[in-house]
Image (cartoon, rainbow, N blue to C red):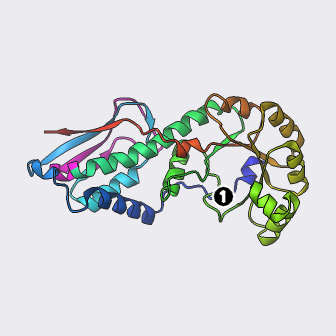
Amino acid sequence: MADVMLNTDQINKVPNDIVTRLVRESLAEDIATGDITAQLAEDIDTTAFCITREEMILCGQDFANEVINQLDKNIQITWLYSDAQKVPANARIFELKGNVRSILTAERTILNFIQMLSGTATVTNKLVKLISQYKTKLLDTRKTIPGFRLAQKYAVRCGGGFNHRIGLFDAYLIKENHIRSAGGIAKAVTKAKKLDSNKVVEVEVTNLDELNQAIAAKADIVMLDNFSGEDIDIAVSIARGKVALEVSGNIDRNSIVAIAKTGVDFISVGAITKHIKAIDLSLQVQL
């Protein structure tokens, strides 16, 4: 049922126009009127290597390539790994050859993109591996850095996770305030299906009574918000063969396995895009 219900488009590549815009804005805020410190270096060509200090899942190649494209097309970038690949600690990720001043100017912007996106890909992959023996799929949320949603959702895909809604437009997610405003779960679901029968209708519930209401209203997915382990087990029994179940709320590596064991279809984790631990990278210039 999970494969059928999860019909939102998966972000397997960040659109070129978004990559171009984010890189342009990032370079503009960093360089502004010019990189004054880079001018202290000799105007010569050199080689530089990017090295990771920890094991990681790589994400962000297109952004690094676009930094070079916008800053200095004469710089050559050679990748030793590809997006979604595991990179061991202390490995070289890519090599740069070109003008040392341009490389110094590009350094921080390139590292910022790769550190952030690889951080999300890496933590996602760790959670995915923890639940790999179960049918449960790991989902992201809309808790993303403004402007970087598609980039972060792409990072989740690189880590082996799946994308939940991209935005407010591609699926209904009926929460407490929507339910109250619409006059109840049944009315909210009925109206949603009437407005667009092709869109998935998901209802967030906080107790088993609301779960039964959502099933009766023929919701496609029910999100169990902050349910106890015991209530999740009961919910799985109630919903089996009737509706897909998603669990959300304060989930981490210490609790995710127990939740996946219950047999729910999805687990959504906002922390993978909201609480980002940047990967420890460095760029070493060879002179």
Which image quarter is the C terminus in?
A: top left
**Can residue 240 be spotted in the picture?**
no
Rendered position, 24 above or below 59: below
Q: Which residues are magenta?
A: 77-104
Specify whether residue 236 is painted magenta: no
> Mark 1 sits on what residue?
8
Q: Position of residue 118 (x, y in %)?
A: 45, 42
**Along the line of sight, the residue nearer the viewer: 244 or 148:** 148
Specify whether residue 101 is painted magenta: yes
Q: Position of residue 16 (x, y in %)?
A: 43, 63
In percent of the image, x 30 and y 61: which residue is there?
Answer: 28
Rendered position, 103 above or below 261: below
Q: Position of residue 24 (x, y in %)?
A: 34, 62
Q: Residue furthest bottom?
A: 195
Label 1: few (<14), some (14–19) or many (≥20) C-alpha neighbours in 10 Å? some
Q: Position of residue 139 (x, y in %)?
A: 64, 46
- In the displayed structure image, the side of residue 239 where residue 70 appears, left or right: left
